[in-house]
Amino acid sequence: MTEILLILVAAIALAWPLGHYLAAVLKGTPSRADTVFLPVESAIYGLLRVDPQRGMTWRGYAAAFLVSNLLLGVFAGFVFAFQDHLPLNPDGIPGMRWDLALHTAISFLTNTNQQHYSGQAQLSYLSQLVGIVSLQVLTPMMGLGIAAAMLRGLFGGRDAATAPEGQPRDLGNYWVDVTRLTLRVFLPLSLLVALALTTQGVPSTFTGAATVQTVDASAGASEQTIPLGPVASMVATKQLGTNGGGWYGPNSTMPLENPTPLSNALQIVSIVVLPIAVVFMLTPFTGRRRLTALVFGVMGTLSLVSLAVTVYAERQPNAAVAGLAAEGPNLEGKELRFGAESSALWAAVTTQTSNGSVDAMHDSLNPLAGTVTLVDMLINSIWGGIGCGLIGHLVFLLLGIFIAGLMIGRTPEVFGRKLETQEVRLLSFLIVLQSLTILGFTALALVIPGAAGNSNPGLHGIAQVFYEYTSAYANNGSGFEGLADGTYWWNLSASAVLLLGRYPCLLIPLLVAGSLAQKRQAPETAGSLNIESVTFGATLIAVIVLITVLSYLPALVLGTVGEQLMLAGA
C-alpha cells in the first residue's frame, strides 16, 4: 500500500507543473526555450507550407486532423506490409498480411495500440521505430490539440472579443498546436524516460537477436534466441502517450521491457502523469481555477474508487486454486516480483487512462477486478487518453448541465452560452454510438459460428469478446487474452470499432464547441446554474455512473458480474 501511495503522490506532484507548462506551450507564451525550438518549428511550418499565424475554424481544424491521419495511416500500413523489402530488418521478418497490416496501422493511428501480433517476432526495427513509435509520438499530441481547440471554442474562440455573433471562431492552428506539443513536451519527456529505463536494463540497441547458451539444457534446448532492439525508446513513448503497445508480445510483464521494481514504478507514473497534467492545464489555459477543481475532483473520486475495488479484489484468493495451496492474494497471471497490489494498481490506471499496457494478464484477474477494468473503459474519461479523456469528460459535463437544467427548470448554459437542441442531439448520439458499436459487434462475434475464437466457455468466454470490443472502442488496447484474434474477422471488425471509437468521439465534441463559440455570451447571474460546485460534481458522477450502468449492465451480468455472483453463491 505504501508503494501505491508513493506512486500516486509522485504522479500528481509531477503533473502540476507539467500542466502549467502545457498551457504555456499551447498559448504560445514566450520562453527561453524559443531559441532552441523556434528554428525547428519554423522549418517544419515551411516544409508543410503552413502559416503559423493563421487561425482555423472547427472545420479547418478537423480537416487538418483528418488529412494528417490519412497520410500517416497509409504510410504506416505500407511500412508494415512491405517491411521485408525495407532496411533495418536484421532478423529477416516477413511483411504482414494485408488485414493485419491494416489493423495495426489503424490501431496505432487511433492511439489504441491493440496488438493482434507479437512485436518482437512480426515487426522489423524499421516498422517498430518509423511505423509504431512515430505514431505513438504524434497521435496523443493530436488528441491534445483537439482538446485545446474544444476548450477555446467553449470560451468563444481566440477571437471572442472581436468576432461578431454567428461567425465561425478561431479555435487555433492544428499544425502549430501539434508541432509545439510534440517538440516542446513529448519528445523531451520521452528522452528522459527512455534514458531512465535504459539504466534499469531495458535494451537500447540496433543489433539483431542474441543467441545464448541456456543454463540448464536438460529440457532439450541448449540455445535460446533473445530478441533485442531499441526497446527503451518505445517503452517511454508507449507509456507517456497513453499508447500501451509493447515491443514484446507479453508487454510490460516481459523482464526485458520492465526489469525492476523501479522501472515498474516509473512506467506507472508515466502512464498517468500527462492525463493528470491535462486536467491541471485547465487553470492557466482557461483562467478558471474552480473548473480544474471540479474536473480533478470528479476524475479523482472515480479513480480512487476504481483503484480501491481493484486492489481489494486482487487481494482475495483465486477460486480456481482454492484448497490446493495456502490462501493468499490472486497471483495467477502475475509477475511474482511485482506482486498482487502493484499489478492491481497497474490494471486500474491502464484502464482509467487509454493506455492498455499490462504488467499482469487481465484475463487472470478475479471477476470483480475484471469488471472494474471494463467499467473504467466504458466510462473512458476517468483520466482517459491525453486530450481524449478530457474531451470525453467534457461530453459528460455538457450532458450533466443539460440534465441538471431540466431538473431545476433552468435553460442549460455553458459558460454563458446556451446549450440547445442541436448540441444535445450530437452529444447524445455519442452515447448511443458507443452502445450500438460495442454491443452490436459483440453479438455478431458470438452469433457467427467460429468468429469469436474465444478460449473459455460460458460467461468468461462472453467477457473475452465484450472486453476486446470495449477496449477497441475506448482506444485502450488491453485484452482478456486467449482470443484467436489474428483472424480476418477480428482484424477487420476491430478496425471498424477502432475508427468509430476515435474519430466521432473527437470531431463531434469539436463541432459542438465550434457551434457554442458562435453564440452570444450572456453574463452569469445568481440565477445561472453553478457548475463549478461540489453539488454539481456529485451530479456529474451520478450522470456518468448511471449512463454507464444502464447501458451495459446486462452485458456485464452475462460476463464478469455473472462470474462474481457465481463465486459468491458457491
Image (cartoon, rainbow, N blue to C red):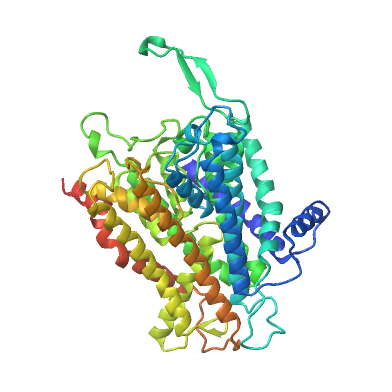
* Corner quadrant of residue 48: bottom right
Q: Is residue 37 left or right of residue 104?
A: right
Q: Is residue 255 left or right of residue 217?
A: right
Q: Residue furthest right?
A: 35
Q: Position of residue 386 (x, y in %)?
A: 56, 57
How many numbered callouts? 0
Q: Residue furthest left?
A: 570
Q: Position of residue 489 (x, y in %)?
A: 34, 49
Quarter that holds the N terminus: top left
* Corner quadrant of residue 53: bottom right
Relative to 66, residue 204 above or below = above
Observer-nearest of 275 and 485 = 485
Q: Residue at x 41, y 14 (%)?
A: 221
Observer-nearest of 365 and 419 = 419
Q: Position of residue 554 (x, y in %)?
A: 25, 61
Q: Residue at x 38, y 39 (%)?
A: 361
Q: Position of residue 559 (x, y in %)?
A: 26, 52
Relative to 546, residue 120 above or below = above
Q: Residue furthest top?
A: 218
Quarter that holds the C terminus: top left
Relative to 36, residue 405 above or below = below
Can residue 94 be seen by looking at this rendering? yes
Q: Residue at x 40, y 48 (%)?
A: 491
Observer-nearest of 468 and 31 = 468
Can residue 542 be seen by looking at this rendering? no
Relative to 264, residue 104 above or below = below
